């Protein structure tokens, strides 16, 4: 290809080189919303003709009990030699067609679709956002910010009655259910965050202890 290469980063090559479905097609995407547009499919006549030639040679030589490897190799060589140039020309045509579906931003140089284009400013909506949309979005951000501030204040007030020193278990030791700090397990009803006491003297017995530290009784 010659000259400037457009869409160097936001296109996908959908060309198919082999078989009767061989041809050229390219998919271009908007740099802002990523919606895509595909160029019309152009069949690669050289490969299609070579495919039918291969089939004919295989059929003919199959009847004779021989192989036509030399002829099919020659066909492959001719097709391979013409593929690169044919693809480049197809890409040029696809780009020319794509430029009718995309706009190039004069500020960031991105290519964007019509929905992402501020025609009044000649810029993409990244660089020149729609004023009405930005105003509505700013109002919503202000509403959300104020709601968050008031909710935070309400949470601080409610937190005055929260006892941070109270023992809590987030997972039930009996059945493994998540408890979210509740007093009883919702899975088995086990009472949570209660210290183990000696049945003889009611002294708190540490987890894992075999004997009561108060009276020496075996747990």
Image (cartoon, rainbow, N blue to C red):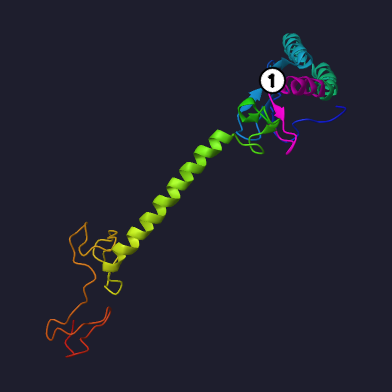
**Residue to which mark 1 is pinned:** 39
Q: Quadrant of residue 188?
A: bottom left
> Is residue 34 shown left or right of residue 9?
left
Q: Is residue 65 left or right of residue 213?
A: right
Identify the residue at horizontal 64%, vertical 24% (top origin).
37
Does 183 lie within the magenta span? no
Q: Which residues are magenta?
A: 88-111
In the picture, which quadrant includes the C terminus? bottom left
Q: What x and y, as percent, mark residue 60?
A: 75, 8
Which is nearer the eye, 201 or 130? 130
Residue 94's image quarter? Answer: top right
148 sits to left or right of 110: left
Q: How many marks?
A: 1
Which residue is at the far right? 2
Q: Secondary structure at mark 1?
A: loop
> Compared with residue 114, is residue 191 higher up or lower down, i.e. above or below?
below
- At which x and y percent is residue 87? 79, 23
Q: Is residue 107 magenta?
A: yes
x then y, percent, for residue 202: 14, 83
Quadrant occupied by the N terminus: top right
Residue at horizontal 65 percent and vertical 36 percent from the top = 128
Residue 64 in percent (x, y) is at 76, 9
Q: Is residue 132 above or below residue 84?
A: below
């Amino acid at each position: 290809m010659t000259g400037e290469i457009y869409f160097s980063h936001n296109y996908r090559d959908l060309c198919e080189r082999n078989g009767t479905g061989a041809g050229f097609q390219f998919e271009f995407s908007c740099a802002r919303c990523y919606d895509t547009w595909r160029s019309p499919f152009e069949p690669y006549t050289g490969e299609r003709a070579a495919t039918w030639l291969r089939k004919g040679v295989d059929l003919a030589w199959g009847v004779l009990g021989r192989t036509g490897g030399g002829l099919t190799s020659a066909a492959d060589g001719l097709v391979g030699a013409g593929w690169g140039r044919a693809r480049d020309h197809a890409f040029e045509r696809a780009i020319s067609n794509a430029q009718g579906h995309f706009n190039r931003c004069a500020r960031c140089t991105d290519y964007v679709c019509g929905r992402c284009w501020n025609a009044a400013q000649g810029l993409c909506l990244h660089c020149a956002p729609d004023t009405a949309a930005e105003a509505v979005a700013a109002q919503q951000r202000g509403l959300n910010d104020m709601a968050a501030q008031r909710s935070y204040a309400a949470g601080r007030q409610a937190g005055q009655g929260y006892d941070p020193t109270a023992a809590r278990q987030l997972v039930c030791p009996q059945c493994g259910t998540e408890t979210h700090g509740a007093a009883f397990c919702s899975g088995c009803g086990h009472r949570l965050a209660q210290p183990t006491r000696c049945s003889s003297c009611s002294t708190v017995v540490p987890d894992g202890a075999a004997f009561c530290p108060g009276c020496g009784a075996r747990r």
